Image (spheres, grey):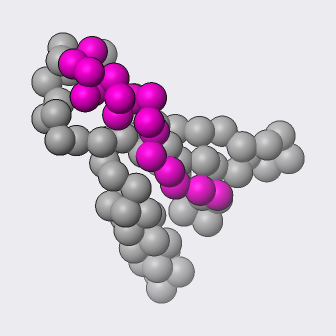
Amino acid sequence: MISDLVYVNPAHVVMVREDVTFTGMLHEGRLNHLSIEPAMSFSRISVRNGGTGNYEITVFGDTEMVYEKIRTTQKALLKG
């Protein structure tokens, strides 16, 4: 079951790319138990983690949508 909620600081995002592993599993029908639309895709967000390197988070949505959400959030934070 997927239940974790994670907040990401947009200023620390290094890269957003398609998670081909999860997207492939979805298209192969291996994630049917999650009741996700077959047209959905997954993206992987790489986040800078201080001096210890980067960590990655897999999220629902294509890379353009995820990037736009991050970019929009960052602008809102800068204006605040």
Residue drawn at (43%, 63%) of the image = 67
The N terminus, quarter of image = top left
Residue 59 at x, y = what percent?
Answer: 39, 41
- Residue at 18% across, 14% down: 33
Left or right? Give the position of 5 relative to 13.
Answer: left
Horizontal side of 61 relative to 58 (left or right) equals left
Q: Is 60 located above or below residue 34 in the figure?
A: below
- Residue lying at the far bottom in this picture: please name it: 79
- In the depicted view, which residue is nearer to us: 48 or 31? 31
Image coordinates for residue 78, horizontal then vertical, percent: 53, 80
Q: Quick check: 21 left or right of 31?
A: right
Which residue is painted at 13% across and 35% down in the image? 37
- Residue 3 visible? The answer is no
Res 38 quadrant in image: top left
Which stretch did the figure color magenta? 14-30
Placement of 34 over or under 78, stated as above or below: above
Quarter holding residue 39: top left
> What residue do we see at 35% from left, 29% from top?
24
Whether residue 78 can be seen here: yes
Residue 31 placed where, x, y %?
Answer: 25, 19
